[in-house]
Image (cartoon, coloured by chain):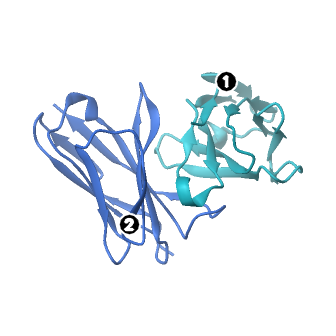
Amino acid sequence: KAGVTQTPRYLIKTRGQQVTLSCSPISGHRSVSWYQQTPGQGLQFLFEYFSETQRNKGNFPGRFSGRQFSNSRSEMNVSTLELGDSALYLCASSHRGGLNEQFFGPGTRLTVL
Amino acid sequence: AQTVTQSQPEMSVQEAETVTLSCTYDTSESDYYLFWYKQPPSRQMILVIRQEAYKQQNATENRFSVNFQKAAKSFSLKISDSQLGDAAMYFCAYRSALRETSGSRLTFGEGTQLTVNP
């Protein structure tokens, strides 16, 4: 079974631009969560989608948004990029809630210049 | 809101020795899950071990075991017979069992960088 895939793996953008990151979960998984990892703030939860609905949202500004498609693939979008948005963005998928293990993708490294 | 604290930013261990990583958490909930994740230099997060709060028995996965003290809100990870491949950043994480409000959301600690010396 293929793992969680994230594209692109690396991105360089400039301030003010917007960016879209993609995450394809493991086949059959309906829950997709996004996390931001930075040296200063650590791992922070962005949002979770389950069956195309946002189920939970972290404490991030409205510039961060996401969506999930009927095939469970998810995208997150960051508009009006700031230098502080430079981070590793991790996506995780699971079959559903409970103790079902979350499987993480390799991440997208975003650099904002 | 729940918080997770890892008070050891860095730890080191000799190959074949045993090391314990500490984690404490704060929550008002009675039912939840706790995890230890490993993040090697590749940045791929890998689940090491998990514990359900309602289970008193400590979880064990081969060389990895936990010491879960619910009253003290402590969840430490013991790695026995350390191997060079165990070198990584280790994160402790909390997840509420209240699926309706928290879903699959994980709250992570700051991480502990483990070095294994040959």
Residue in view at x 82 percent, y 51 percent: B59
Numbered tag placed on residue A53 in the rendering: 2
Q: From the image, tell me which residue sits under label 1.
A: B11
Question: Which quadrant of the rendered structure holds the C terminus of chain B?
Answer: top right
Residue in view at x 10 percent, y 42 percent: A17
Q: Is residue B31 left or right of residue A42?
A: right
The answer to whether residue A64 is seen in the rendering is yes
Mark 2 residue element? strand
Name the foreground residue: B54 vs A102: B54
Q: Quadrant of residue B25?
A: top right
Q: Quadrant of residue A74?
A: bottom left
Above or below residue A26? Residue B58 is: above
Q: Quadrant of residue B93?
A: top right
Numbered tag placed on residue A9 in the rendering: none
Chain letter of the residue carrying label 2: A
Q: Is residue B19 left or right of residue B105?
A: right
Q: Which chain is cyan?
A: B
Residue in view at x 17 percent, y 44 percent: A79
Above or below residue B27? Residue B105 is: below
Residue in view at x 82 percent, y 40 percent: B68
